[in-house]
Amino acid sequence: MSQFESSMIRNIAVAGHGDTGKTSIVSSLLFTSGGTKRHLKVDEGNTVTDFDEDEINRRITISTSICSTQWKKHKINLLDTPGYSDFICDAYPALASVDIAAFVIGGGSGDEFNLERLWDSGGTLPKARIFLINKLDKENTSFETSLKNAQNLSPRAIPVALPIGKELEFKGIVDIMDNRALHFDSATGKLKHTDVPADMADQIEEARMALIEAIAEADDSLLEKYLEGEALSPEEMKSALKIAILNGQIYPVIPFSANNNIGTAFLLDFIVDYLPSPTDVPAKKAADMELVCKPDGMMVAQVFKTIVDPFSGKFSIFRVYSGTFKPDQQINNVTQDETEKVTSVYYLQGKSQEQTPGVVAGDIGAIVKAKSVKTGDTLGSSDCKVKIKPLIYPSPLISYAFTPQSKPDEEKISSALTRLAEEDPTLRYDRNMETNELVVSGMGQLHIDVTQDRLKRKFGVHAIVSRPRIPYKETVKGTADVRYRHKKQSGGAGQFGEVAIRLMPLPAGEESIDGLRFVDMVVGGVIPNTYIPSVEKGIRSTMIQGIIAGYRVKDIKVELYDGKSHPVDSKDIAFQIAGAQALKQAFQQAKPILLEPIMKARITVPETNMGDIIGDLNSKRGRVMGMESEGKKQVIIAQVPLSEMQMYEPELRSMTGGRGSFTMAFETYEELPSNLADQVVAQMKKHAE
Ligand SMILES: Nc1nc2c(ncn2[C@@H]2O[C@H](COP(=O)(O)OP(=O)(O)OP(=O)(O)O)[C@@H](O)[C@H]2O)c(=O)[nH]1
Ligand SMILES: [Mg+2]
């Protein structure tokens, strides 16, 4: 594809709830505009943008992908974003990197809470937005109902076209601005102009008045004219509509059927005629600088997506904000403070790529195998020092332990997860040092399943997935005083060490190292100085292994106040053993308990769910710490044990019909009630048998 002037480019992210037809819409636009020879379908698994095997098998979009097409000398970049809860986060960076958001609403009565979620993300959305009401060819769909859903998000949602016929009879649309009817050949998407159906006259007039009113309201001089009863000329209306869209004062609504190509040619015209180009929107700001969209001068781009292809390597997809991203040069990765030698620059079309002599300001391109480059990084020419605000990702919501099945799996799993996490910033993994498990965290059950599949398919790594162990800790509530003698003096070299310790909980305000405050109170050299560290070592290694249930011991104080040694048989190992055994005995006597991790959760739910959520938190041994309102939703702040929150993501999803969301972070450790502690100890014993 040749280069286009910035003003001839349109960048659109197609976003919305799952299964509303986003990928199908992109596919129908590609077909109608000649970008593909055939009309490729999600159901046939051959679309340009759902190219990943997991996407094809599951018939859902998992990861944002990009393609472009041409229409009336313009280049239209289309970003097809995921709509399912587990993957929706990939839509945010896409939306933050375009000038136009096309929000798709399925024409049926389905609940589309992920669209609300995107909508509420506010600041990162482009100002210019349109609504596409899709699937109107299906039974039980209604343009009016879906329009209401759009208007519930914002009253600025105003139709610029109306459907002709409904459900199976949906055959065309009326273009309200130009007062003409458009029929579409569903096989080709080509337009046929026809007369406006007479029986729609009133409906069209009403929609036209609503549109004119909205346009007039967005422009003071037009409003005056309008209020004085003067007619607005078509040219005035068109240019005012364009400005109103640019400023986010009107969100045009268009009826659509991706599968039957209804609305496609109209939408392509609408994109070219009314939707903003990168030169229309305000310049992107980076620190104090405005990145003016022009092809010369300093180049600044931001990477908003990474795709790792096992064969071709890592693609970093960027939007250029100023200058031109050219091949054969050294570029600055400003965010990572690294440089990269770039030999080729590409345009992407789904999974295929094409070299280009340069990507101009406002356009989207990709580089391959740039080691230091991560999603969110600012790339620039060598004179570039500015950094664009990084993209922010939500924290993961659900965690599982991934246990490699075999030795070779074990060797490969970390690097495979690193590669997967490179293209998916919502996927995290970490080795939990307390439980020694590899814990993989993601946005939902499906995300974890897909990760397990991808490890197998892309990297040949087989992992067993299970609930992660809770990193309980052991400590004491009481005190104990124990004297222990380790003696082995029959045959061979003897061993002798005797220690007397006092064990107590770590007093508030006293510092510990790794959970132990060890105090040497030995006087008169009853234990030689060289063996004091041996005693401490024995105690510490026992603490790591755990005493009552195999979890780490923390927050204890041990005073070593007496002991005995033997001139020949005393040695390091003897005092280590004596220290370890003394601690074990003292621990059992000093009212041992288990501590459990307590999380602080922020749960955002619709008002109507408050009662259920609080009731559920009570049953989870949670404590509500506060409540506040956030827009139309309520936020509950609570402390809840981690063990009760491991499956909260699917639970909250079902309790709120998908409308709730939450974040949580570790807060503190607290005593596990004794009945539950007994269960943990029993389980541990069973496990050890
Ligand atoms: N009847 C009808 N079905 C449609 C239309 N558009 C999409 N579909 C069907 O709806 C299903 C989902 O379509 P997709 O295009 O994958 O939906 P999506 O919004 O991209 O889904 P995610 O990316 O997973 O959120 C497929 O079975 C499509 O054939 C349409 O206009 N009419
Ligand atoms: Mg899709």
Image: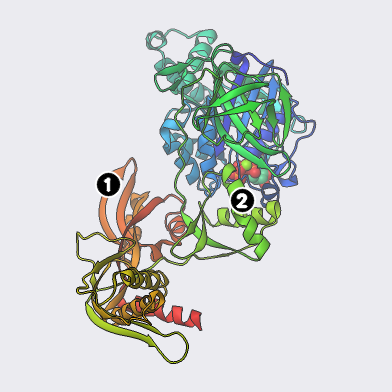
Q: Is residue 531 left or right of residue 332?
A: left
The residue under label 1 is: 628
Instruction: Compare residues 425 and 112 and report the one nearer the observer.
Output: 425
Q: Which residue is at a point 53% across and 46% down the rendered structure image? A: 109
How has the structure been colored for display?
rainbow
Which image quadrant shows ligand 2? top right
Secondary structure type for disc 1: strand
For the residue carrying disc 2, how many other residues have a C-alpha within 10 Å: few (<14), some (14-19), or many (20+)? few
The quadrant of the rendering that contains the N terminus is top right
The residue under label 2 is: 415
Q: Quadrant of residue 456?
A: bottom right
Q: In x, y percent, where is residue 434?
A: 43, 64
Instruction: Compare residues 22 and 507 and report the one nearer the observer.
Output: 507
Q: CA distance from mark 1 to mark 2?
A: 42 Å
Name the residue furthest right: 37
Q: In x, y percent, where is residue 661?
A: 41, 50
**Above or below, 521 relative to 252:** below
Q: Quadrant of residue 568?
A: bottom left
Q: Which label's residue is closer to the chain start, 1 or 2?
A: 2
**Above or below, 482 relative to 436:** below
Q: Which residue is at a point 57% across and 41% down the rendered structure image? A: 106
Q: Is residue 138 visible?
A: no
